[in-house]
Amino acid sequence: MAPDGDDDGDGGGLPPWAPWVLGAVGVVMAVTIAVLLTLLLTKDDGGEVADDTTTTEEETTTTSSPSTTTSTTEPAPEPTDPPVGPDIPEPGDGTAEGAIATWAIDQDFIYVGDCAAASPSEDVILCSTFWEEGGDSVVYGLGPPASEIAIWVLLAPGPTGGLEVIDSADAFEFPTPPF
């Protein structure tokens, strides 16, 4: 074998640093392809890079009469408030459902009461199912209507005598209440 690492001895072998250069070129090409694909996949139909900002839709009304044309633009309606009505528990009323409603508001959930009376919705809402009672405490399971329990809550009498949520747990981590 020739001293340059070439078997035929003609001096045409690759220098020892060549595999590193070829590897670096391959990495640069792979990164370039990944960037190009990302840019191509994030373009909207207008050829501009899509952004993730949310825009509000506006409703335009045009009224015409023989002598004048009037155009008004009204903002899109705001999202509706959480459901209210006789079946929706009143937060802080001392009942189990009132205590859960108070807790749900503090957690930024919409609570609609007993799951038996709740209907499925596209909104992220919670309903409750009685689970068990032990002494002064009560355990309820919470989750979306017509779905499985996602959260356990433990209720007990508070300083005012009404029920309050004193603890909660992830039902996916704890298949049965851990209290």
Image: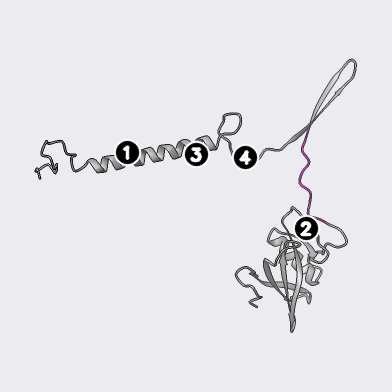
Locate residue 158: give its quadrant.
Answer: bottom right
- Are dots 1 and 4 in contact, CB under 8 Å? no
Q: How far apart are marks 3 and 2 (CA)?
A: 37 Å
The color scheme shown is one colour
* Range covered by the magenta-colored residues: 74-83
Residue identifier under label 3: 38
Vertical arrangement, residue 67 with respect to residue 21, above or below: above
Mark earlier in primary sequence (1, 4): 1
Mark earlier in primary sequence (4, 2): 4
- Are dots 4 and 3 in contact, CB under 8 Å? no
Question: SS class of the residue under badge 1?
Answer: helix
Mark earlier in primary sequence (2, 1): 1
Q: Which amino acid does label 3 sit on?
A: Thr
Q: Residue furthest bottom?
A: 135
Q: In the rendering, at what x and y percent does residue 102 appear? A: 75, 65
Answer few, some or many: residues within 10 Å of disc 4's Cα (few below 14, many 20 plus, some between 14 and 19). few
Question: SS class of the residue under badge 2?
Answer: loop
Residue identifier under label 2: 120
Q: Which amino acid does label 2 sit on?
A: Pro
- Are dots 1 and 3 in contact, CB under 8 Å? no
Vertical arrangement, residue 57 with respect to residue 131, above or below: above
Q: What residue type is labelled 1?
A: Val
- The residue shown at (79%, 74%) is 162
Locate residue 92: give its quadrant.
Answer: bottom right
**Image position of 156 (left or right of 25):** right
